[in-house]
């Protein structure tokens, strides 16, 4: 078998031997140099707003570099092979080969190595973003078709009581978190599988009915961010939006105080849902309690 492959190699028609591998390697090096000048933000990431974003951005960037190098190599081979081994004259057919063990071993082993390297770096990143600090705040997130309720479980808060806020499809709720303080996010679903996603955290987690998922995170940049459901959960999934505000501690405490004064005391165990979509459903004039089931 290797003899047949050797026959391919030795066939040169008297031309100087070209070095396509060297060219592909050069292209790959250029790609790496270009990409390594990038940050996660150049690749479409929003500015990170938590302490966990850097490892994720690095993983994303590394994956793009690896995919770019492999892509260039594979495309170069696809173009090079038929040009190199094409039929060059009417009378001579290029060597016909059926098996080549080294090549078959290579294209079986190489993808396994690629997958293992990706897997290793994914696990490594996952370890890096595991919580290190004991959370000082706990927020219970209740996902409902099609909005969110946020309950601030705060024994130490002003007034010492948990408070909540509930949104609906027309009024996106606001989740407020204090900057530089680790917070535990506990995820509950009232009905179907949703997913809690803040793009600026570079992180999301499924919200599964009957299952208590949670993660902790430390917001690091004050500002207003988008939040959304990233699991196609039903008709008005696209309206399942919320606003995340990362604020200083005083503003956070004042917000909790406001919720308390508004009578939103306790934990939202079950939220009523509405089918009304402003601008979409003209005949829906009123919100129906639990009407979406
Ligand atoms: Cu959803």
Image (cartoon, rainbow, N blue to C red):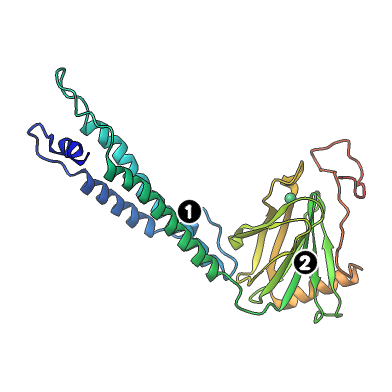
Name the front one of labels 1 and 2. Answer: 2
Q: Quadrant of residue 46?
A: bottom right
x and y percentages locating residue 242 in the rendered image: 73, 56
Picture quarter with the N terminus: top left
In the displayed structure, does residue 208 sit left or right of residue 286? left
Q: Quadrant of residue 16?
A: top left
In the displayed structure, does residue 4 sit left or right of residue 204? left
**Residue in the picture at 21% in, 43% down:** 20
Q: Residue furthest bottom?
A: 156
Is disc 1 placed on a helix, strand or loop? Answer: helix
x and y percentages locating residue 107 in the rendered image: 35, 45
Picture quarter with the C terminus: top right
Q: CA distance from mark 1 to mark 2?
A: 32 Å
**Residue in the picture at 66% in, 60% down:** 225
**Residue in the picture at 57% in, 71% down:** 51
Q: Residue furthest front?
A: 1
């Amino acid at each position: 078998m290797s003899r047949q492959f050797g026959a391919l190699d030795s066939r040169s028609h008297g031309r100087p031997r070209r070095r396509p591998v060297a060219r592909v390697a050069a292209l790959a090096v250029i790609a790496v140099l270009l990409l390594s000048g990038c940050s996660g933000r150049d690749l479409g990431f929003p500015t990170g707003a938590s302490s966990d974003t850097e490892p994720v951005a690095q993983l994303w960037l590394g994956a793009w570099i690896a995919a770019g190098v492999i892509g260039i190599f594979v495309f170069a081979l696809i173009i090079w092979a038929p040009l190199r081994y094409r039929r060059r004259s009417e009378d001579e057919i290029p060597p016909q080969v059926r098996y080549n063990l080294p090549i078959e071993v290579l294209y079986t082993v190489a993808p396994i190595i690629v997958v293992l390297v990706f897997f290793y770096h994914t696990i490594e990143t996952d370890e890096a973003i595991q919580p290190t600090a004991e959370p000082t705040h706990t927020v219970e997130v209740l996902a409902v078709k099609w909005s969110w309720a946020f309950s601030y479980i705060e024994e130490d808060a002003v007034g010492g009581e948990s408070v909540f806020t509930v949104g609906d499809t027309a009024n996106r709720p606001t989740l407020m978190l204090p900057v530089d303080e680790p917070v535990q996010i506990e995820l509950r679903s009232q009905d179907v599988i949703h997913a809690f996603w803040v793009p600026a955290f570079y992180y999301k987690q499924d919200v599964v009915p009957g299952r208590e998922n949670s993660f902790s995170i430390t917001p690091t940049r004050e500002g207003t961010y988008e939040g959304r459901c990233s699991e196609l959960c039903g008709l008005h999934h696209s309206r399942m939006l919320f606003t995340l505000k990362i604020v200083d501690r005083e503003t956070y405490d004042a917000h909790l105080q406001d919720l308390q004064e508004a009578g939103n005391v306790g934990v939202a165990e079950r939220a009523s849902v509405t089918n009304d979509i402003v601008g979409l459903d003209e005949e829906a004039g009123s919100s129906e309690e639990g009407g979406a089931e």
